[in-house]
Image: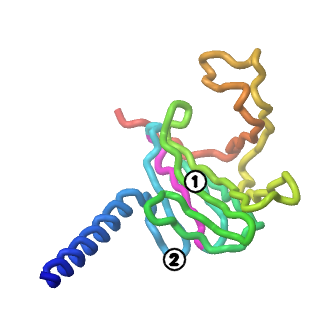
Amino acid sequence: MWRKVGAGIAAAGTLGAGGTVAVDSQINPYEVSAEKYELASVSTVEAAGENKVEAHRDRPAVTLSKWNGEAAMTVAYEKVNAAGSRQFLTDRVEWKGASEEVHAYPLLAGDGMEDGGFEIEVVLDEPPPSNVFEFQIEDADEFDFFYQPPLTAEESCPTTQRDPRTTLPARAGFFLGSLTWRAPSQ
């Protein structure tokens, strides 16, 4: 009798673990290599090619590219010195330092973000010595960046779908180079 119970527990454990691995493979959006976690998708803009996000495994850095790599830049957070790993049963890549972590993960497509997005966040384990967080922007020579203040109540309207109480100041990057335009298929 105990052999049957033991065999049943072993079978359930094996099936349960196999099921968990199968679920994880459904959650994991990345192609994994020794250097990076790569997430590629075809743009919703007709004839705009491929969008790609590469989360570096050796340091907290994410390379964002569009138009089949013609427009690309890397955002890095050098304060955390750690290798990245994807957390089991999540789509999140994490780099864990002594007192802070960097998390990076894809955002779902939505209104105003038709191709989806990618979030990079710093998670603090203790109060920081400063409220300034410095990110390095690499390989962005063909971009111009401009400060965008938050919307005021007068600037907000139903068509912007942005709440001035929660809209933070930001920087907008504009690509200055020329892109290879591909005529839409008829």
Q: What residue is shown at x 43% (from left), y 58% (from top)?
A: 29
Image quadrant containing the C terminus: top left
Q: Mark 1 near mark 2, Cβ–Cβ under 8 Å?
A: no
Q: Amino acid at mark 2?
A: Ala
| Residue matched to label 1 | 65
| x then y, percent, for residue 70 | 58, 53
**Is the residue marked by circle 2 packed among few (<14), some (14-19), or many (20+) residues within 10 Å?**
few
Image side of residue 118 versus residue 3, left or right: right
Q: Dominant secondary structure of the magenta stretch?
A: strand
Image side of residue 2 versus residue 53, left or right: left
| x then y, percent, for residue 96 | 65, 69
Of residues 86 and 127, the one nearer the viewer is 127
Q: Which residues are magenta?
A: 47-57
User: Residue extending furthest bottom?
Assistant: 3
Of residues 70 and 76, the one nearer the viewer is 76
| x then y, percent, for residue 114 | 50, 36
The relative height of residue 152 versus residue 37 in the rendered view (above or below) is above
Q: What residue is shown at x 63% (from left), y 45% (from top)?
A: 178
Secondary structure state at the residue bearing disc 2: loop
| Residue matched to label 2 | 34
- Say which quarter of the image contains residue 148: top right
The relative height of residue 22 versus residue 34 in the rendered view (above or below) is above
- Ranked by sequence position, the earlier of labels 1 and 2 is 2
